[in-house]
C-alpha cells in the first residue's frame, strides 16, 4: 500500500461499508492508428453533416427563388387592380352616356391613375425629345434631314417612349434622329 501512495494513488474508501478498493486504472491510451481512425470517422461525420446541410440550403433557396419568380409582379398587379376597377366603371359610362366631354374626362382620370400607380412603383418615363442622341438610352429608327443645324444629332421624334425602373433602363426609347 505504501507503493501506491508513493505513486500518488491512494486507496479509495467505500464509506457505506468501510471497505477499501483499489483505485480505478485509466484506460490504456489509444494507439496512434486507433486515434487516427477515430479522428477520420469524426471528420467524415462532420463532412456528411455539412453536405446534408448544404443540400438543404440549396433546396430551400431554389424553392424561395421559384416562389419569388412566381409572385414577383404580385405587388404591381395588386396596385393596378384599382385601376382595372376604374377602367370597368369607365367602360360602363361609355355605353351609358353620349356626352363626349364627360367620357374624355373619365378616361383621362383613368390614364392619370395608371401613370401615378406605376410612378409610385418606381417607373419613370425617359425624356428624349430635343436631347442629344445617346446609344446608351436611345434606339434610332431612322435619321431625317433637318433644316436647322442645332437639331442635328438630336432626337426629333419619339416613336416609342423609353422607361426607367428604379433608375435602371427597362426599355430603350425608339427615336428619330436629325441629320
Image (cartoon, rainbow, N blue to C red):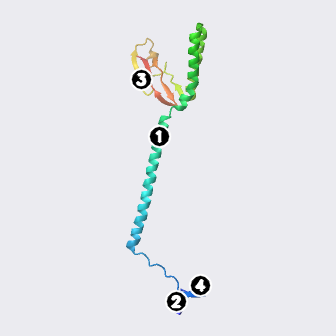
Which of pointers 3 and 4 indicates the residue nearer the eye?
A: 4
| Residue 166 appears in the figure | no
Along the polypeptide, which appears first: circle 3 or circle 4? 4
Residue at numbered disc 2: 4
Along the polypeptide, which appears first: circle 1 or circle 4? 4
Residue 165, horizontal then vertical, whole percent: 51, 30
Query: How dense is the environment of label 1, judged by Cα within 10 Å: few (below 14), some, or many (20 and up)?
Result: few
Q: CA distance from mark 3 to mark 2?
A: 97 Å
Along the polypeptide, which appears first: circle 2 or circle 1? 2
Q: CA distance from mark 2 to mark 1?
A: 70 Å
Residue at the spot 41% in from the left edge and 71% down from the top edge: 35
Residue at the spot 41% in from the left edge and 68% down from the top edge: 38
Residue at numbered disc 3: 139
Query: How dense is the environment of label 2, judged by Cα within 10 Å: few (below 14), some, or many (20 and up)?
Result: few
Q: Is residue 152 or residue 139 the one in the foreground?
A: 139
Residue at numbered disc 1: 65
Which of pointers 1 and 3 indicates the residue nearer the eye?
A: 1
Amino acid at each position: 500500500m505504501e507503493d501506491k501512495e508513493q505513486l500518488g494513488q491512494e486507496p479509495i474508501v467505500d464509506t457505506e461499508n468501510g471497505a477499501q478498493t483499489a483505485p480505478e486504472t485509466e484506460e490504456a491510451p489509444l494507439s496512434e492508428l486507433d486515434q487516427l481512425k477515430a479522428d477520420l470517422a469524426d471528420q467524415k461525420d462532420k463532412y456528411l453533416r455539412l453536405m446534408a446541410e448544404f443540400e438543404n440550403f440549396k433546396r430551400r433557396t431554389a424553392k424561395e427563388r421559384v416562389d419569388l419568380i412566381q409572385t414577383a409582379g404580385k405587388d404591381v398587379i395588386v396596385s393596378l387592380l384599382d385601376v382595372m376597377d376604374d377602367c370597368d366603371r369607365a367602360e360602363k359610362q361609355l355605353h351609358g352616356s353620349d356626352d363626349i366631354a364627360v367620357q374624355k374626362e373619365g378616361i383621362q382620370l383613368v390614364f392619370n391613375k395608371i401613370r401615378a400607380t406605376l410612378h409610385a412603383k418606381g417607373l419613370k418615363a425617359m425624356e428624349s425629345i430635343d436631347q442629344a442622341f445617346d446609344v446608351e438610352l436611345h434606339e434610332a429608327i431612322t435619321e431625317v434631314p433637318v433644316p436647322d443645324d442645332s437639331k442635328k444629332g438630336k432626337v426629333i421624334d419619339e416613336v416609342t417612349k423609353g422607361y426607367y425602373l428604379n433608375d435602371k433602363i427597362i426599355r430603350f426609347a425608339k427615336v428619330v434622329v436629325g441629320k
